């Protein structure tokens, strides 16, 4: 269980809170979607939950472990799939994954087998010994995903895992995540693909200006929103149609 209590984040020099007094509980084995317009605070919230940045105030725990007291245990418990690729272009997929596995203390035959199984599952086994620099965006995203789950995290955070990938790669990634979830992994992900989130998530929260404006099962949110036929209708009805550009 993830418990977020009144978490706020104001970046240094910023005049607004990026996450504002946000509380939320996410249950074990959920697939939970964090949705919201550009700049809503999704990445900031995920970065806090992954202990990549500190909240300005408030607290959170994952399986009763708090980031202040159990940093190392939390690191083993969670996996992080960031928006940006964290891969070395001059190393092969296999070499990259060996490196990421070793960062979690994994090694030997067991690690090799796990890498090969995951590469196969994600349709990449025949490219295992090709350099990452030659991979397409969709292939890199799939390797990135494997790098984040080699230590079998109980909770997996993904920041827009299907952005910029073709439909084929997207389907393989979503299927893989569903399989992981079936085996017991809790998944928290951000996305702008509302149709995908509607089908994939057990629950979603729509975030705007750093606050949750609604949360629940996609079907329930659609039923409860006047005139809505899908999650995108709910999203637009709650967040409006105005662009969110700012610099
Ligand atoms: N390092 C930073 N320093 C200052 N402000 C930041 C920083 N990172 C994010 N912000 C601001 O915090 C707010 C929330 O940004 P965040 O990236 O969390 O939103 P998001 O919902 O993930 O957006 P997107 O969908 O565009 O990825 C934005 O106003 C953004 O400009």
Image (spheres, rainbow, N blue to C red):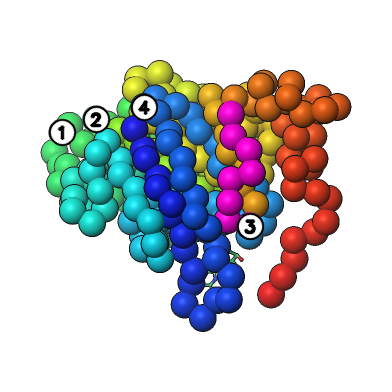
Q: Earlier in the sequence, mark 2 or mark 4?
A: 4
Mark 4 vs 1: CB contact within 8 A: no
Q: Which residue is drawn at 69% across and 75% down?
A: 247
Distance Cα–Cα, label 2 vs label 3: 44 Å
181 or 148, nearer to the observer? 181
Q: Earlier in the sequence, mark 3 or mark 1?
A: 1
The residue carrying pointer 2 sits among few (fewer than 14), some (14 to 19) or many (20 or more) residues within 10 Å by Cα, namely few
Q: Residue at x 36, y 27 (%)?
A: 28
Residue 13 horizontal side relative to residue 229, left or right: left
Q: Quadrant of ligand 1?
A: bottom right
Residue 118 horizontal side relative to residue 196, left or right: left
Distance Cα–Cα, label 4 vs label 1: 31 Å
Q: Earlier in the sequence, mark 4 or mark 1?
A: 4
Which span is picked out in magenta?
Answer: 209-216
Which type of secondary structure does the marked residue at label 1 adopt?
Answer: helix
Distance Cα–Cα, label 3 vs label 1: 48 Å
Residue pointed to by mark 4: 28
Mark 3 vs 1: CB contact within 8 A: no
Q: Which of marks 2 and 3 is nearer the N terminus?
A: 2
Mark 2 vs 4: CB contact within 8 A: no
Which type of secondary structure does the marked residue at label 4 adopt?
Answer: loop
Distance Cα–Cα, label 4 vs label 3: 27 Å
Q: In the rendered image, which quarter contains the N terminus?
A: top left
Residue pointed to by mark 2: 113
Residue pointed to by mark 1: 109
Judge whether residue 83 can be spotted in this image.
no
The residue carrying pointer 4 sits among few (fewer than 14), some (14 to 19) or many (20 or more) residues within 10 Å by Cα, namely some
């Amino acid at each position: 269980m993830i418990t977020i209590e009144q978490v706020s984040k104001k970046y240094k020099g910023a005049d607004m809170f990026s996450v504002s007094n946000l509380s939320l509980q996410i249950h074990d084995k959920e697939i939970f979607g964090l949705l919201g317009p550009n700049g809503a605070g999704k990445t900031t919230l995920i970065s806090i939950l992954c202990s990549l940045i500190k909240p300005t105030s408030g607290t959170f725990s994952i399986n009763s472990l708090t980031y202040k007291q159990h940093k190392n245990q939390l690191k083993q418990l969670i996996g992080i799939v960031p928006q940006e690729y964290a891969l070395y272009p001059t190393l092969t997929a296999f070499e990259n994954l060996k490196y990421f596995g070793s960062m979690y203390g994994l090694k030997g035959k067991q690690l090799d087998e796990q890498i090969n199984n995951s590469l196969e599952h994600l349709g990449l086994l025949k490219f295992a010994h090709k350099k990452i620099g030659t991979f397409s965006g969709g292939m890199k995203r799939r390797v990135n995903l494997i790098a984040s789950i080699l230590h079998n995290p109980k909770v997996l955070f993904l920041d827009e895992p299907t952005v910029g990938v073709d439909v084929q790669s997207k389907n393989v990634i979503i299927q893989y995540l569903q399989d992981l979830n079936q085996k017991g992994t809790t998944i928290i992900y951000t996305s702008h693909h509302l149709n995908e989130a509607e089908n994939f998530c057990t629950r979603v929260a729509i975030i705007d200006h750093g606050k949750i404006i609604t949360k629940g099962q996609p079907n329930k949110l659609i039923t409860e929103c006047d005139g809505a036929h899908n999650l995108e209708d709910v999203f637009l009805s709650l967040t409006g149609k105005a662009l969110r550009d700012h610099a």
